[in-house]
Image (cartoon, grey):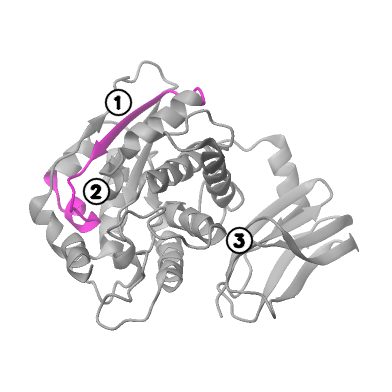
Amino acid sequence: MNAIKTILIISIIAFGINFNYLSANPKSNQDTCEILLIGSSYFNYNNLPDKFENLSASAGKAVYIEMHGNNGLYLWDHARSSSTLAKINERDWDFVVLQGVGVLVAYPEHFAEHPVYPSLITLRNIIHANCESTRMIFCLPWAFEDGMTWYQNWTDDYEDMQIHVYNNTLIYSDEIGFEIAPVGWAWYGVLDAYNYPLHYLHMSDWNHPSLRGTYVMACAIYSTIFQESTVGNSYLADIPEEEALFFQQVATDTVMNNLELWNITPNIVGDNEIFDRKICKMNQNNPNPFNASTRISYWLSEKLHVKLIIFDSLGSRISMLVDEFQDPGNYEIVFDALGLKAGVYHYQLNAGDYIQSNSMILDH
């Protein structure tokens, strides 16, 4: 396995095959959403563009989508590629979606030959020089199925590596200014719920996406772009319906419950959303990840009946931290995780008619 993964990370670029994908439905009206995917094998495996287009068509969305990239390429290669520059400059894209690689995002100091941070800056500048209104989205990558336990006696497992990916992606997004499609975080939610089965979202190489993994990725990108739920979408990609509906739910919740965390600019801000944001707001817990306790803060602009509830990854209620009327002001509640197993948990604020949910990680 070590040799296989070394080839995947370092050497596969020498054997890359070009898999450019073009939607059969060219842009026919101003409502068509034009999307460019820039990546490599993670997007090419299982034909992600096809999965995304089918999800969109089933929801009544008109999309024009192209995939640019050979297997084995990194963002560092794309940032210096004349063909990538030309592809970006072909259209005034609505969205350019970039594919990252987990190991490069998690451990930039150890894998500096393909630096992600400067690549994202270069690509951002190229994209916005072509069309200032184009929205750049970076797919938060997933960790290797066995983390870094295969490499130079490292002990970081899947969860350790995924948390590194999560933290660095949020830092990069804040500093560079791009939106995040939280693909790897949705994978984390699925795998945690199923107790981490081997080769479920990953293929047997411990790295590339299985059909299930690609479907979760397509759902997460869809919700990021359109800011809509995929739950109930009729396109299941030959995945059993019960599984597909669960993947839709996890991907939707991961994105839609945390738009601010992922730096996603609202497409349309309706009257209800403006009203809700004036009434109250809940922040990301701090610290996150945490190993004993964490603080959850929120503010209210008027007196409301407030419930603050903790759920596990399967949606079972763990604790009711608050259940009372509260006056306007700032609040901070401590959640003590004593006796709980490590994993992903969710916390939900119910304040009047307002509901907001976020995710957090308990890491013993």
- Report the quarter where the N terminus lies: bottom left
Give residue 201's position: percent from left, percent from top: 41, 53
Task: Give the magenta range.
Answer: 59-82
Q: SS class of the residue under badge 1? A: loop
Identify the residue under disc 1: 23
Q: Is residue 161 above or below residue 77?
A: below
Q: Mark 3 packing: few (<14 Cα in 10 Å), some, or many (20+)?
A: many
Amino acid type of the residue tagged 3 in the rendering: Ser
Foreground residue, 221 or 9?
9
Q: SS class of the residue under badge 2? A: helix
Give residue 179's position: percent from left, percent from top: 44, 51
Q: Is residue 78 magenta?
A: yes
Cα separation between marks 3 and 2: 29 Å
Q: Mark 1 packing: few (<14 Cα in 10 Å), some, or many (20+)?
A: some
Q: Mark 2 packing: few (<14 Cα in 10 Å), some, or many (20+)?
A: many
Label ID, residue 359:
3
